[in-house]
Image (cartoon, rainbow, N blue to C red):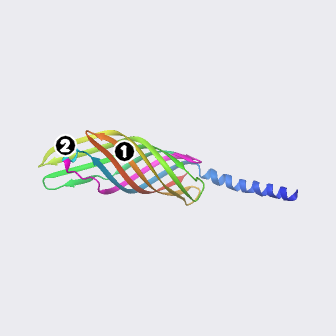
Amino acid sequence: MKKIISMLSLALMLFGFSAPAEAECNGWYLGARAGAVSNDVSDDSGIIGGGDGNFDDEKLMLAGSIGYRYEWFRTELEFVWRDYVKQGDEDISQKFKTYSYMLNFYWDILPYNWLTPYVDLGLGFSKVKYHSIALETVRNSFDTTRFTWAIGGGLSLKMTNRWNIDVGYRYYDMGRLEKADISAQEVYVGTRYIF
């Protein structure tokens, strides 16, 4: 009987310590990410880039988010900024740039471990800008908004119950601009703090 009481007391103590720790992992958070993005403009018609555009150079991307986490799941609003890509020579100058407003959903597979994998799905809109000048004359110019979906995954390292560091990958599909398919791939490092 004494052993049973001792075991129950130990279980209650462990629950008492673990429950607040798990509770600290849940709640509202702010996040920031930085990484490299590579754009893909598939345009056989030549409208974007005149058939000779190449916009897959790796460029800087920065993102900020506010979200809420509860146990295995996270939901957040995020703004993603991407540096513009410039191509051309003395005769032709081309600039391509995108940025996105996203609603993201995450599944933390092992939510209370020090290291947990996660997958994510995002829905939102992207601003797509393209500007082409040939011999000092504007050849093509687009500034439009497109529906965007994204999918990705990564690993999250729990530094404390409130502070996490994320490393991940994400693929974006930004739809079509004229006859061009617009997409992007990014790798990033990020941080989140629950308050």
Q: CA distance from mark 1 to mark 2?
A: 22 Å
Q: Secondary structure at mark 2?
A: strand
Specify the farthest residue to the left.
135
In the rendered image, residue 129 lying in the magenta stretch gets the answer no
Residue drawn 60% across the image and 54% down it: 112
The amino acid pointed to by label 2 is: Asn
Determine the secondary structure under disc 1.
Answer: strand
Judge from the rendering whether residue 82 lies leftward or rightward of residue 93; answer left or right.
right
Indicate the quadrant where residue 122 lies: top left
Badge 2: how crowded within 10 Å, few (<14), some, or many (20+)? some
Q: Nearer the viewer, mark 1 or mark 2?
A: 1
Query: Which quarter of the figure is the N terminus placed in?
Result: bottom right
The magenta segment is: 51-74
Q: Residue 8 at what x, y percent from top left?
A: 80, 54
Residue 59 highlighted magenta (yes or no): yes
Which is the main secondary structure of the residues drawn in magenta? strand
Residue 56: image location, x then y, percent: 29, 54
Q: Residues within 10 Å of mark 1 (few under 14, many from 20)?
A: some
Give the labeled residue for mark 1: 173
Residue with the mark numbered 2: 140
